Amino acid sequence: MIFGKRNIAGQGDGVLSCDGGGDSGEGHHGSVQEGMRLSLSGREGKSLQDAESIVEKRKSWYTYIHRQGKRERALEIIMGHAHDDKSISSVRSFVYDMLGPAPDRGDLLYRYEHSLRAAENAAVVAEAEGLPKDDLIIACLLHDVGYRECRDDFRRHPFFSADISKSYLEKIGYPPEALREMVKGIALHNLTDDLPKDMTVFQISVRDCDDIDRFDMIRTAMLLGDCVNEKTNQEIIASCSQAIDSANWIMSLPRGTRTAQDMINENCRKRIAFLQDILAQANKGL
Ligand SMILES: [Fe+2]
């Protein structure tokens, strides 16, 4: 199976993104270390040293989930899917159960549908680039599977998602080599341009397929609403300008494949065109 040596399309200068609450967060950035610190500290107030020692002792993120009393729900659902047949439809059903959308949790229904769209992007990228198609589709389906478990601490969701995915994929007997690639891609899917040197094209593609959807029309429509709702012309100009900078920055980031780069650029250019039209209208009032 070919997961691809490092062959990055594009360049950048070193930050880590987090989706943030509601997945609107193009604005949250930090280092990998910061990501780990955030993931292990927070409510229990642990230092970075404490966090690293926890990792070294191989007390997994899952152990951390357990400390907060969240493990049982995830384990119960994984056990309920123990006999899944490794098919895409089974994984979809597992992701739905893990996210557990409810009438009062429209954000999790959004998360589920976002995961389906990321998986559709994966099919396109894998097909064009010769990556293992089902593995990439399944990794993208699973990439946000820990969203409910991390509750309001969304910065940690890649690690929760990776741990839950690992447990699930092991339980259903997924081939180990593919499983390792998928879990690493999920754990690192929020990185932007400070990518580990050994990160493979497959692993980077998980995050690329996520980003393609994060900058596609639904998210662009959500962003445009945020940029203008109940805002003055000056505020609209400021928020649109910031969003244009963000889209330009996203296009500058390294990508795993040319196909993903092209898809993201197309989405970002569309977004920028809308934002520039709004800017022009807001400027009429000055
Ligand atoms: Fe995510």
Image: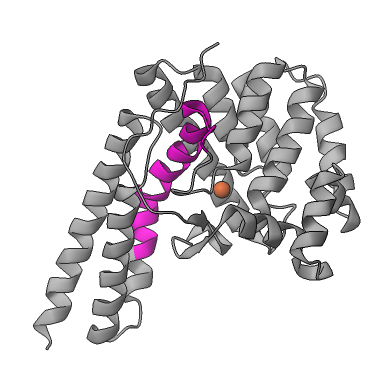
User: Majority secondary structure of the magenta segment?
Assistant: helix
Residue drawn at x 17%, y 65% is 276
Residue drawn at x 54%, y 18% is 134
Asked whether residue 207 is drawn in magenta, I would say: yes
| First to last magenta residue range | 197-223
Vertical placement of residue 23 versus 100, above or below:
below
| Residue 99 visible in the shown view | no
Asked whether residue 2 is drawn in magenta, I would say: no
**Res 189 → quadrant:** top right
**Res 80 → quadrant:** top right
Residue in front for this viewpoint, 57 or 209: 57
**Res 96 → quadrant:** top right
Residue drawn at x 64%, y 47% is 158
Vertical placement of residue 244 versus 134, above or below:
below
Relative to 241, 35 lies left or right: right
Vertical placement of residue 247 versus 236, above or below:
above
Locate the N terminus by quadrant.
top right
Picture coordinates of residue 18, whole percent (x, y): 54, 57
Picture coordinates of residue 182, whole percent (x, y): 61, 28
Residue in front for this viewpoint, 257 or 82: 257
Residue in front for this viewpoint, 147 or 8: 8
Picture coordinates of residue 284, whole percent (x, y): 9, 81
Relative to 172, 225 lies left or right: left
Locate the C terminus by quadrant.
bottom left
Residue in front for this viewpoint, 72 or 17: 17
